[in-house]
Image (cartoon, rainbow, N blue to C red):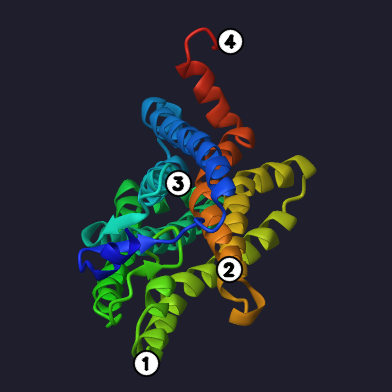
Amino acid sequence: MEGANDSSPNHFILVGFSDHPRLERTLFVALLIAYLLTLLGNSSIILVCRRDRQLHTPMYFFLTHLSFLDLCFTTSSIPQLLHNLSGRDKTVSYSGCATQLFLFLGLGGVECLLLAVMAYDRLVAVCRPLHYMATMNPRLCRGLVSVAWGCGMANSLAMCPVTLRLPRCGHRKVDHFLCEMPALIRMACVNTVAIEVTVFVLAVGIVLSPLVFILVSYGYIVRAVLQIPSASGRQKAFNTCGSHLAVVSLFYGNIIYMYMQPGASSSQDQGKFLTLFYNMVTPLLNPLIYTLRNKEVKGALRRLLPGTAR
């Protein structure tokens, strides 16, 4: 089977976790449960934020987009992975691989930028509370979200064709469970220094720049909070930002650990599990972070679900 697929120009073989057949069965069950919970959790956040008028504020407008983004991000790769884990067929069509690469790159970039937008929202809420609703007006909110989606997808649109057109000299085995850019670049049989430099430059703009903005924003937020005279006021301000900061730490902590290590210090299997965490566990935990730490969302859930309102 593999020989036929290797010679076919229309397919790639996703090696995934095929070196560990027993692990594949366990992963299939765990990922199926996690994927269904991710769909349920993020769909619930979207439904609650849309249906409850008390949550029609800029913060929850951005949270709705984050939940929708997580739904798309997980769905771009997990169903294909579940299919590959469930049997001996490890192939993915060329168009399927290209779509997966485009979505994985694009949605990852959108999330970086959207988290920066949410940090700006928290900055205005804490540092300029009296001007919050005037500053974060609906037009600005829609514009910021449009820029995040547009820049993320434009970055992917620039990088995908370059990556897919690299000569591979007949190699079709992708040593990963999805078509991600580093794995596809490693398959090339030509010098890839130029594309790696380009990737690094774009990564600085779409990954590191938002992170720097987030850190600077929280520097100003912490300074403003420490100037609040009452302990209850400080606690309320920190709670306002706590959920977002937890999501940022989870998202960027995994990315930094995954991409900032020297190649020799991390195995390929470790990279697969880190990508799996980034692609599955983070979208699964985000709804929990926002519901467990947020009284307004929990209150809206009680009002929405029959028999739970008090």
Residue 51 drawn at (x, y percent): 37, 25
Secondary structure under badge 1? loop
Of mark 2 and mark 3, the one earlier in the sequence is: 3
Q: Nearer the viewer, mark 2 or mark 1?
A: 1
Secondary structure under badge 2? helix
Decide: marks 2, 1 in contact (CB < 8 A)? no
Picture residue at 41% right of the left edge, 53% below the top: 135
Q: Which of the 4 image quarters holds residue 254?
A: bottom right
Secondary structure under badge 4? loop
| Residue density around tag 3, few if under 14, some if 14–19, many if 20 or more, within 10 Å | many
- The residue to which callout 4 is attached is 310
- The residue to which callout 1 is attached is 191
State the separation of the CA atoms marked 2 and 1.
Answer: 23 Å
- The residue to which callout 3 is attached is 85
State the separation of the CA atoms marked 4 and 1.
Answer: 65 Å
Which kind of residue does numbered mark 2 sit on?
Answer: Met
Picture residue at 75% right of the left edge, 40% below the top: 232
Of mark 4 and mark 1, the one earlier in the sequence is: 1
Picture residue at 68% right of the left edge, 60% below the top: 222
